[in-house]
Amino acid sequence: ARVKTVMERTRIADMANRQCGKLSKGYKQRVGLAQALIHNPDVLILDEPTAGLDPKQIIETRQLIKELAGDHTIILSTHILPEVSQTCQRVVIINKGHVVAVDTPDNLTARLRGSETMYVQVDASGAGSDAALGALGRISGVTRVVEADRREQSIGFEVESESGRDIRRDLAKTVVSNGWGLLELRPMRMSLEEIFLHLTTEETV
């Protein structure tokens, strides 16, 4: 009964009569998961579970891992950092055998930046770069403004502010009151790749 249940849960029941050696890489990964789940462990350790899979199989495996997380504690060991951000609720970064960070991806980003950075894109037809830089730089709490990109119809700026200071309303108000046209306003976050490199380089250990 347990074999049938696990096969259905890992979606390999349709391959019950096939030899494992003739299965695709994706199905072989699921067979491995089924073998690990057969005794219903409290903790499931997965080492690079999507390595070598095609995009469709990767999506299916991620979904399966998320479903299993409801009944098991899952430890995912991987160097594929986008995998971590899309699958995991908590991150542990280890460098040379030492734990250098334990937190949620969002908290790691906020803690390591030390300042808040927003991306603001305005309508280029109504805004001059120098005028916008000056106006955005005068907002209370803003510490730095730089032009990030320029396109035919828009100009993008990176606006840094004091840590813990929410300047989104003031940014929007400044852009709109100057009649520039607000096209985009969003927080800029460090990627997990940037966080990993920051925490594991020689200078920061």
Image: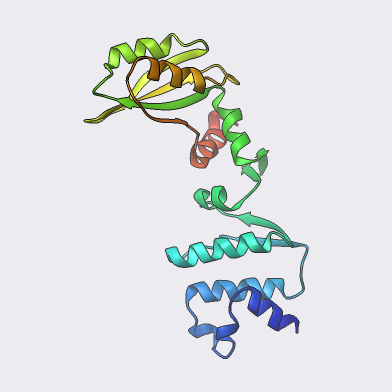
Q: In the rendered image, which quarter contains the N terminus?
A: bottom right
Location of residue 118 with respect to 25 vertically, above or below: above
Location of residue 31 with respect to 102 vertically, above or below: below
Residue 158 appears in which quarter of the rendering? Answer: top left
In this rendered view, identify the residue nearer to me: 178 or 132: 178
Q: In the rendered image, which quarter contains the C terminus?
A: top right
Task: State the colouring used for the structure image.
Answer: rainbow
In this rendered view, identify the residue nearer to me: 192 or 79: 192
Q: Position of residue 196 (x, y in %)?
A: 54, 39
Q: Residue at x 53, y 53 (%)?
A: 83
Q: Position of residue 77 (x, y in %)?
A: 61, 55
In this rendered view, identify the residue nearer to me: 8 or 83: 8
Farthest left residue in view: 152
Q: Residue at x 58, y 53 (%)?
A: 87
Farthest bottom residue in view: 17
Residue 182 appears in which quarter of the rendering? Answer: top left
In this rendered view, identify the residue nearer to me: 175 or 11: 175
Q: Is residue 180 visible?
A: yes
Q: Residue at x 62, y 43 (%)?
A: 93
Residue 98 appears in which quarter of the rendering? Answer: top right
